[in-house]
């Protein structure tokens, strides 16, 4: 089997590329109908087929919400390839104003442990609600990390706010990494791209970046080389793909970027390219 550049997350050796799940579970960040089509298309078998490509290329970590379909497909891919795939589970739970109870969170952590997750990193819709910019803290996060550790999981957090990374470092939280949006389009990023890069480069821990292709707004050949060339050697890139062939293409583009070479890939042909191909004859 092939290998891929590796890094460390909480003492676990993982690939720097992470298999994402938005194109498995219907989170297209485009239209409702696109999301519904994805959910109708993707089956346990289809998802497992994509994950098998990642595993075969040395990519041994996947990220998703706490979803039974993802857990089952991941297990199938592991069994068929004969290789471990670590799961970064990103749960979220119901929170009520003024209620510090973590009962709902504990249920999520229990489910993550029972489902076979290795990492448990609360999703941005939980983390960013707990962020207190005035007092520069993330409320209850120390307790949340302890609860996650007690279940044998490795804690982390997901955020859409770069200042949460700075705050997590200031608090010296017991976490392995932080999930952060980073792409050349600035999609869903609330400050300039170079400022997000600064936060990433100054972070105490590896940063696990997401949406490198801006949810389909950037071509892979544009989005992937940008993130690989501007991150640190220990940071990670989460890549979502719909099909096995898309996974293969994104992996090859990523390898080429890391190896400073031209990607070995077939370009899409359209009628407008006819004069270019004729001129080469």
Image (cartoon, helix red, strand yellow):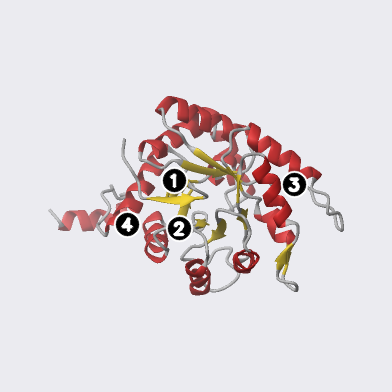
Cα separation between marks 2 and 1: 12 Å
Mark 3 vs mark 4, CA separation in Å: 37 Å
Residue bearing mark 1: 13
Q: Nearer the viewer, residue 220 or 239?
A: 239
Q: Give the SS element for disc 4.
A: helix
Question: Which mark sits nearer the N-terminus, 2 or 4?
Answer: 2
Considering the numbered disc 2 on the image, is that residue within a helix, a strand or a loop? loop
Ranked by sequence position, the earlier of labels 2 and 1 is: 1
Which residue matches tag 4?
258
| Residue on which disc 2 sits | 235
> Is there CB contact under 8 Å for labels 2 and 3?
no
Disc 1 on helix, strand or loop? strand
**Residue 236 position within the rendered picture, expressed as x and y whole percent measured from the top left:** 46, 54
* Left or right of residue 152: residue 74: left
The correct choice, above or below, for 87 with respect to 184 in the image is: above
N-term-proximal mark, 2 vs 3: 3
Residue 71's quadrant in the figure? Answer: top right
Question: Which numbered disc flags the more N-terminal residue, 3 or 1?
Answer: 1
> Residues under labels 2 and 4: Cα distance?
13 Å
Instruction: Look at mark 3 in the image and give the residue it sits on.
Output: 93
> Can residue 173 be seen here?
yes
Q: What element carries label 3?
A: loop
């Amino acid at each position: 089997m092939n290998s891929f550049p590796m890094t460390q997350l909480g003492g676990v050796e993982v690939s720097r590329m992470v298999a994402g799940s938005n194109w498995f579970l219907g989170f297209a960040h485009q239209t409702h109908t696109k999301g519904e089509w994805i959910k109708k298309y993707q089956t346990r078998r289809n998802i497992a087929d994509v994950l098998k490509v990642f595993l075969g290329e040395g990519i041994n970590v996947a990220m998703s919400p706490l979803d039974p379909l993802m857990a089952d497909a991941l297990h199938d891919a592991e069994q068929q390839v004969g290789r471990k795939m670590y799961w970064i589970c990103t749960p979220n739970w119901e929170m009520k104003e003024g209620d510090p109870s973590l009962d709902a969170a504990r249920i999520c952590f229990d489910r993550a442990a029972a489902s076979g997750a290795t990492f448990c990193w609360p999703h941005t819709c939980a983390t960013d609600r707990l962020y207190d910019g005035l007092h520069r803290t993330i409320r209850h996060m120390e307790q949340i990390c302890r609860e996650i550790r007690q279940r044998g999981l490795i804690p982390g957090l997901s955020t859409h706010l770069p200042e949460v990374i700075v705050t997590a470092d200031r608090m010296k939280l017991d976490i392995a990494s932080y999930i952060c949006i980073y792409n050349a389009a600035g999609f869903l990023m609330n400050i300039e791209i170079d400022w997000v890069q600064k936060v990433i480069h100054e972070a105490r821990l590896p940063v696990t970046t997401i949406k490198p292709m801006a949810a389909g707004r950037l071509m892979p050949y544009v989005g992937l080389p940008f993130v690989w060339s501007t991150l640190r050697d220990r940071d990670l890139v989460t890549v979502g793909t719909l099909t096995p062939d898309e996974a293969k293409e994104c992996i090859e583009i990523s390898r080429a970027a890391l190896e400073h070479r031209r990607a070995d890939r077939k370009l899409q042909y359209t009628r407008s390219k006819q004069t270019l191909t004729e001129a080469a004859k």
